[in-house]
Image: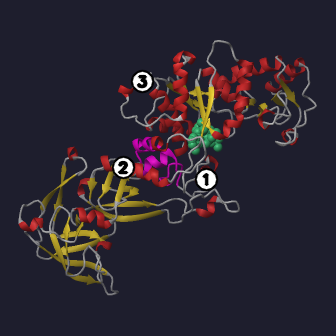
Amino acid sequence: MKTENTEPEVKRSLNFIESIVEEDLKNNKNNNVILTRFPPEPNGYLHIGHAKSICLNFGLAQRYNGKTNLRFDDTNPEKEEVEYVDSIMEDVRWLGFNWKGEAHYASDYFQQLYDWAVKIIKDGFAYVDDQSAEIISQQKGTPTQPGIESPHRNRSVEENLDLFTRMKNGEFKEGERVLRAKINMSSPNMHMRDPIMYRILKRNHHRTGNNWCIYPMYDYAHGQSDYIEGITHSICTLEFEVHRPLYEWFLDHVYTEGTIKPRQIEFARLNLSYTIMSKRKLLELVQNKIVNGWDDPRMPTISGMRRRGYTAAAIRQFADTIGVAKRDNVIDVALLEFNVREDLNKIAPRVMAVIDPLKIVITNYPENKEEIVTIENNPEDPSMGNREMPFSQAIFIEKDDFMEDAPKKFFRLTVGSEVRLKSAYIIKCEKVIKDSTGNITELHCTYDPDSRSGSGTEASQRKVKGTLHWVSAKHAIEAEVRLYDRLFNDEAPDGHKDKDYKDFINTDSLKVIKNCKLEPSLKNAAPESKYQFQRIGYFCVDKKDSKPGALVFNRTVPLKDSWTKIQNKE
Ligand code: ATP
Ligand code: MG
């Protein structure tokens, strides 16, 4: 077990799961083995809710010198695909976690699960039912009304064994027979009313091919898989709390004294405002081409967030900040964005990029002159060093950094006013040039040759109202910039009774801006590298669409700070 010295940063009090684990360790339970698992069903890409579960399972093991298994819950051959398996492994690794040994698959246990089902039949606790799923569900009763026992409930063990074998051998059609646990049709817990253990599905499975035509149900497969692997703490979301008696019932029927009996612990799933997390709905967004694939940067998937520029460290920090709750709640998505900004603020070099360019000609600056200005890469971290940027007679600034009829409080450029070009000179706007329709095409400015930042002159210290970012026109490189906004314009898109979540799609969630002007140091920016475009936000090079010579940047998050705050700092 880790001592406090090895983890001095953990000052918060224990969450309820950590308390359980510490209690178990104190009591020497399971010989002090801690083995958790992350059990995704490979029927979609992982999302931020899964990230929470991953951080919890792997984090708990790390903290208590344990290990974590990755297990694919692939008991449903209808919906599962190899593409999902690969993406899940990649996402877990990217988040910074390593599972114990090879990845596991519930399908690896099909034979063992079958053998145990046979044992349960022999013990008189399971039977084959010939009724349809529909009838079985009608007979379930309601929480206040007992269910109806199946006419096949009291079949002999021999008959059950024979029928179950024939189910396995493919003698029946899909839906003709099921295997049910024989528990209690009047239990107040509906899950205990003779739940189905096996159904017939004549489908090809991504790993076992056509070896099986009967497949175990989740409740039966899950706990037994935990048991086979020797999982000590089986952490799942709250909706499984009512399944826990069944989880334990199955375990009790296969348990061998002296082995590890997994303990199921439930916590509240992560819900985020402005976000949907149902895999079915996310799949629908992909299939209906409302987004461009599972890794679209607007998706709440791990791969989407990664592509957008979120860091694994920020996601882990977010998971840690929200902690582990016992009651359902909704977390403000702004908290996630806050964690992303915090991390990027530390690691992202500052660069100058003009998204909506307006040309300025500095009329008193020599036409062919070039100067090099030196700029720090990150004021938060001097160890990130400096870079050089060319300055020349023509530059670009952001269109909305200029206003012709500016109100008093406009601290940027207007006719007759002065601003500082960051790390360079003070310029003054002399003249606005317009085309025949009255659109501003460029500005003519003059500069104060003594005002260069860092030159030590009196003018270099001169305070002016605002500081603008800029790039030299002839040195600028062009890039496409993608501005993302929330995918939904409602806080709880799937929380409306009479409306579909798709009614709340934000049709402005992606703005593509071509021909943005970037400082030349970005020419060889590598895929996924992250920057702060000064005064605009955090951006990252798109890993799929960006090419040398045709760079594409995704906006990760805007800067929180308002214009004025940043300007007043300079
Ligand atoms: P499905 O609707 O397909 O069942 P699921 O979200 O439950 O989707 P799984 O692949 O079964 O998906 O989930 C893997 C693990 O991630 C489970 O242990 C589950 O409890 C956990 N998990 C899923 N969604 C969340 C969430 N929003 N918050 C926390 N944990 C989650
Ligand atoms: Mg699930």
How far across and down, in percent of the image, does residue 382 sit? 20, 47
Quarter of the image for residue 232 reads top right
Return the residue at label 3: 2
What residue is shown at x 26% (from left), y 65% (from top)? 567
Q: Nearer the viewer, residue 418 or 361?
A: 418
Quadrant for ligand 2 reads: top right
Specify the label residue 306 is tagged with: none
Of the numbered discs 1 and 3, the one sitting upstream in the chain is: 3
Q: Which residues are magenta?
A: 292-318
Where 164 sits versus 535, above or below?
above
**Which amino acid lies under the numbered mark 1 shown in the image of this protein?**
Gln
Neighbour tally class for label 3: few under 14, some 14-19, many 20 plus, Cα within 10 Å: few
Return the residue at label 1: 287
SS at mark 1?
helix
**Which amino acid lies under the numbered mark 3 shown in the image of this protein?**
Lys
Return the residue at label 2: 342
What residue is shown at x 52% (from left), y 41% (from top)? 52
Distance between the alpha carbons at the discs numbered 1 and 3: 46 Å
**Which amino acid lies under the numbered mark 2 shown in the image of this protein?**
Glu
Q: Is residue 452 visible?
A: yes
Position of 102 with respect to 552 (left or right) is right
Q: Residue furthest left?
A: 457
What residue is shown at x 31% (from left), y 66% (from top)? 563
Mark 1 vs 3: CB contact within 8 A: no
Of the numbered discs 2 and 3, the one sitting upstream in the chain is: 3
